[in-house]
Amino acid sequence: MGTLGLTFVAVGGVVGSGVLFAPLFAARQAGPAAILAWPIASLMLVTVALVFAEVAAMLPVVGGLGRLPAFSHGPAVGIAVGWVAWVGYVTAAPIETQAMLEYASTEPAFDWLFVAGTSANGESPLSVGGVAAAAILLVAFTVFNAFGVALFTRVNTALTWVKLVILAAIAVALLTRFSAAPVREEGFAPEGVTGVLSAITTGGVTFAFLGFRHALDLAGEVRRPQRTIPVALVGGILICAALFTVLQLGFIGAVDPAELDRGWAGLDPGGANGPLAAVLAGLGMATLAKLVVADAVLGPFGAGLVSTASTGRLAVAVAESGLFPRPVAVFSRHGVPLRAMVLNLGVGLVLLLAFRDGWSELLSFNSGAIVLSMCLGPVTVVALRRQVPDRVRPFRLPAVGALARIAFVVVSLIIYWTGWDTMIKLTIPIGVGVVILGWRVVRDPELARSLALRSLAWLGPYYVGLLVLTYAGRFGGGREWLPPGVDMVVVAAFALVLFEWGLRSALPAAAAAAAVAAVPEVRTAAVPDAPAGAA
């Protein structure tokens, strides 16, 4: 996979159906000032991407999010992080599948996908035909990935180009009808700085960017990782930031001032096809409104394709750490982890049946688990600088100590923003992971001796501390004991203390050096391109 292919893995993971509602959610929180939320959030996530870029370029392994922490902190930490990440990842394809079918069902020809009426939780359940269609899509994601990373990259790159072109066309069309009247109606920042921060936190802006992580999971299958990985991780975020900011600006300027009688917070969602389609239809752009629906179907299809690829690699990382059986990590003759993808497909089908009456419950596991699994990246990059200072680093991050600490605070804040309701639910799969690990240790005593449990000790207090902070906080069912502003200072201070504990818990230098030595060093000289036709 080349630079464009990996960059579009990151972009394809970010640009899903959610982008069609994101401008509305952000505008409800911040009004016109929502255009500031996207670049601010992107800069926050760039710090996280940069610390992962140094480690992933130095150690380009399959399933990087789950494997990289094991080099600095040992197998136990790798198992913990890999399991939590896999819990989030394996829900992604079923979620994207149902999102795709929901958008398709807004067309009368596909209304048979869902049962008329709603289930107990207020969502429409999939019909028998809808379950069959969803199952076929999940199988299709696996089949596209089964024939090698080159085919996957071609398909994903083509889909991502289409999605980007459609969204760019929508943004340009909205800008041609831009009016300052909505800004004059309520002012540029009716909620001030608080509104912008709310758009970043609860408005979905930050979470929209988390799809960049998929590029990290496929880092072991790229050409010239010293250039490809940093460019893909950072470039993917910046491309999406530019697109989302322009789209947000166009949406703000196209809103009818008559719709603001209840302020930006009362802005109507625009029906089943979303706010962008509603605004375009109101401007007389019916064809573009139809394109919004088409993009809403293509978005989750592309995101499901990407998530299937990265979830397979992450399952390999979990298997190589010792939690899953070793045969799961075997690659097929096409160079893909087919057994891991079949395992994930089976789990996805079970989740599809279990949550056919409403899949919103899966969303909390998905976002919360993935963000939690990213906490080790900033600690790992600094620990490895101390453990293996002479290792060739094709991409070397300046001021790594300061940037890593900022990145750790950013990740901790995002975890805090997920809220109490999500964090407490994550306790269930974490407990399941402990049981599975106990079973594996009983079956494999050698695994127990290799775990390096001392390096894992700080993660328990870190999780419990964040659990307490979300309970006392103001997001997702928290008790609102911590005032706005004060809560973020408290979370940041807590994160900095735990960062130092995590750093001191790293493996001895000799043990880390031995683990790192098992990965061949990346050449920093130019590497010839792959033959023509390779993706």
Image (spheres, grey):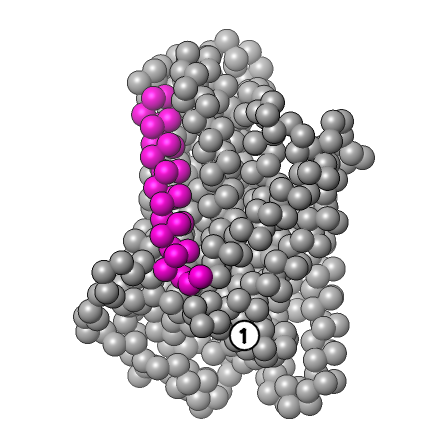
> Main SS of the magenta segment?
helix
x then y, percent, for residue 396: 29, 69
Vertical comparison of 449 with 211: above or below: below
Q: Assess whether residue 151 is covered by the magenta stretch.
A: yes
- Structural crowding at the residue carrying mark 1, measured as other residues with C-alpha within 10 Å and reported as few (<14), some (14–19) or many (≥20): many
Name the residue rendered at 66%, 59% in the picture. Answer: 346
Q: Assess whether residue 487 is covered by the magenta stretch.
A: no
| Residue 383 image-quadrant placement | bottom left
x then y, percent, for residue 93: 57, 50
The answer to whether residue 196 of the structure is visible from this angle is: no
Name the residue rendered at 73%, 78% in the picture. Answer: 438
Q: In screen coordinates, is 11 left or right of 114?
A: left
x then y, percent, for residue 487: 59, 48
Name the residue rendered at 69%, 64% in the picture. Answer: 430
- In this orientation, which residue lies closer to the viewer: 186 or 421? 421
x then y, percent, for residue 442: 74, 85
Vertical comparison of 448 with 367: above or below: below
Residue type at mark 1: give it.
Ala
- In this orientation, which residue lies closer to the viewer: 239 or 298? 298
* Residue beneath disc 1: 329
Q: Quadrant of the N terminus?
A: bottom left
The answer to whether residue 179 of the structure is visible from this angle is: yes
Part of the protein shown in magenta: 147-174
| Residue 491 image-quadrant placement | bottom right
Vertical comparison of 105 with 321: above or below: above
Name the residue rendered at 40%, 53% in the picture. Answer: 9
Q: In screen coordinates, is 157 left or right of 346?
A: left
> As drawn, which residue projects farthest toward the top?
258
